[in-house]
Amino acid sequence: MNVVPHASQWGELIRPDRVHGSLYKDPAIFEAELQNIWYRTWVYVGHESEVPNANDYVVKSIGPQSVIMTRDEQGKLNLLLNRCSHRGNQVCSYDKGNARSFTCPFHSWTFANDGRLVGYAFPDGYEGQDKSKLALGRVTRVQSYRGFVFGSFAAEGPTLEEHLGGAAETIDRLVRFSPEGEVEVTAGFLKHRVKANWKFILENECDGYHPAFVHSSIFGVADSAIGKLYGGNSTALTRDYGNGHTEIDLRPEFRKRDQPMSWFGTTQERLPDYTSRMKAAYGEKEAREIMVDGTPHVMIFPNLFIAEIQMFVIQPLAVDDSVQHVTALQFKGAPDLNRRLRQQTMGSVGPAGLLLADDSEMYERCHRGILARNPEWIFLGRGECRERHDEQGFKVGHVTDEIPSRGIWRHYRSLMEAR
Amino acid sequence: MLSRESSATLMSAVTAFLYKEARFQDEHQYEAWEALWTDDGIYWVPANGDDIDPEKEMSIIYDNRSRISLRVKQLLTGKHHTQTPQSRLRRIVSNIELLDQQPGGDIPVASNSLVFESSLRDDTIWAARNEYRLRYVDGELRMAYKKVTLVNNAKALFTLSFLI
C-alpha cells in the first residue's frame, strides 16, 4: 500500500492480537505518523537540566525536525524550530551553547532566543514589514513534568498530565532516587543509528520475552542476575497504562529479594554516601523502600524510554531509519551512585554496548524480515489468555506477555484514526 | 631523545605490533587480541569529540581491563547476535608516528586507520585516529592504552560490535 489508509481502514491493519507488516515499512504510513503522532501529541524533547542558565540552548529534535530548546533571559523554556523565517536556512549549527540570539548565516537575520525576529540586514528594504509576524517557528505547547520537557504542535488537546495519565507516577518514582528529588541529564548522549522502523524500538522497550534469548551471550559471561527477572517463573509484570505508555514492573522480584540496591547489583555498603543522604532525605524506612524497589522501566509513548539506569529518546528519521539517543540517568545529590550509573550505561548501551548492539541487530533483522510477503501479520497474542487488571485498573500480565505491544497499538490506532 | 638507529628499530617493532593487532581484529582472533593488553589496559572510544572527560561524559567504549575481558568473552560465546555471523573486515593502518617519549614511561604512538566492514546490514566505512601507549612486558610489546577517535563520533553511528 502506498496510499494512506482512510480513518475507517486502520482497524483492518491493527487488530487486537496482530498488526499488519505494512505499518512498519510503508513510507506513506510513516508520513501519516509524522502528522498524526509526532507533530500532534506530546513528544519528549529534552530535560530542564540541559539548559540550567539563562540563555543556554541545546539542539534537540521532534522526528526529523531540528528543535532548539532555549532558556531565555527571563528563564522561560522555548522550543524553537531551527529554520530561518526568511528562506529556511538552519539558524543554529552547534549542538549546545549559551547565546542571547541566533543569527542566520545566509542573510544575517537575527532572532532572540525566545524566537522574536530582532533584526535583519539592510532594513530599508523591509519598510512597512511587521517583524512580529516573522518570528522563528515554535512548538506550540511546551510543558515540563519534574524537569522532563515535552512539546506538542497541537494548539489544543490533552494537557501533558492528561497525556501521561497513570504513567506520571513512574516519573515520580524515578526522581525519588535523588535525595534532592531531581534527575539531571548531564552526561552527554550516545547516538545509535539503526536501519529499522522506529516502532520496532518502541515495542522492544517493554518486551520482557526477548532478554533471555537476545541477551543470553552477556548474561552468561557477566554472571548477571538480570536473566532471572525475565524467566518463566518471574513474578515481574508487564503493564499497560493507556495512552500508549507501558511498563515492565520488576518490583515484585526486588521486593522478594528485600535487599536495598540489589536491583542495581550492589549494596548500601558500597554506596555509603548515597545511602546516608537518602536516609536523611526520606527517613530510614522510606529510603529503604525506595532502594529496594529500584528505578522504573517505562516507555512513555512515543519516544521516552526510562530504562532503570539510563534513558533513551527514540527519533524516527525515515520509515527505515531511526536513532536511539541514550544517556546515563544522573540523580542530583548522588555523586557516588552517578559514577556507577555512567560506567554501567557505557558498558551496556550505544553503538558498542554489550546489550544494545544485540537489540539493534534484532530491529534491523525484523525490518528486513517484514519485507517478506507471507505471513503479512505480526502476531502479538502472547498472554492474552491471562490478562488481568491491577488494583488501579491497569492491564497487567506476566513479564514475558505482549500486553505492552497490544497497548501501544491500541493507542496508535486511536491517534491514526483521529482527524 | 633516542638515537637515529634505536628510533628506527623501535619504529619497526611498533609498526609490526600495530599490523599484528590490526590482523587479529580483522580476523576476529579475540583471545590473541586480548593477550596484547597489559594488566592495566584502557580501551577508549570517545563520543562527541576528541577530548571529552570519560569519567564524566558518555563514551562509545570506555573499558578497563576487566571489561575488555568481558567484551571478548561475549564475542567468544558465539551467541552475540550482532557478530553472528561475524562482520567481514579489512583495515588499513598508516601514518604511524612515535610521539615524544616520557623518561621511563610508556611508548606513545599514533596512527590513522580506515576500516571497511561488511555486515548483514550493509557495508560501512569507519575512519579513526588511534593513540596508543605501548610498553615492553617480558621483552614483548603490549598495549596499556588505546584511544580510537572516530572521525564521525559526534554523529549517530550504526552498531560498532567488532573490535575497532
Image (tube, grey):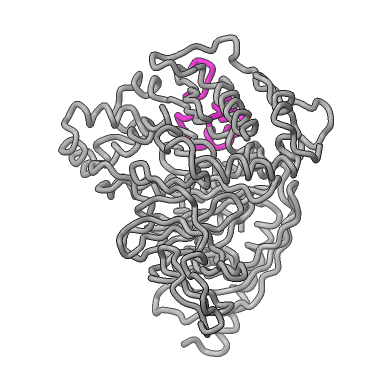
Q: Position of residue B59 (x, y in %)?
A: 48, 57
Q: Position of residue A222 (x, y in %)?
A: 49, 37
Image point 24% across, 48% down: which residue? A333
Above or below, B50 against A139 in this view is: below
Q: Quadrant of residue A383?
A: top right
Image point 68% across, 41% down: which residue? A32
Residue A416 lies left or right of residue B66; in this view the side is: right
The quadrant of the picture occupied by the N terminus of chain A is: top right
Q: Nearer the viewer, residue A124 or A79?
A: A124
Magenta part of the chain: A206-233
Image point 34% across, 57% down: which residue? A76
> Is residue A61 at least partly visible in the picture?
yes
Image point 76% across, 35% down: which residue? A369
Q: Position of residue A205 (x, y in %)?
A: 54, 34
Q: Quadrant of residue B18?
A: bottom right
Please tell me whether residue A212 belongs to the stretch shown in magenta. Answer: yes
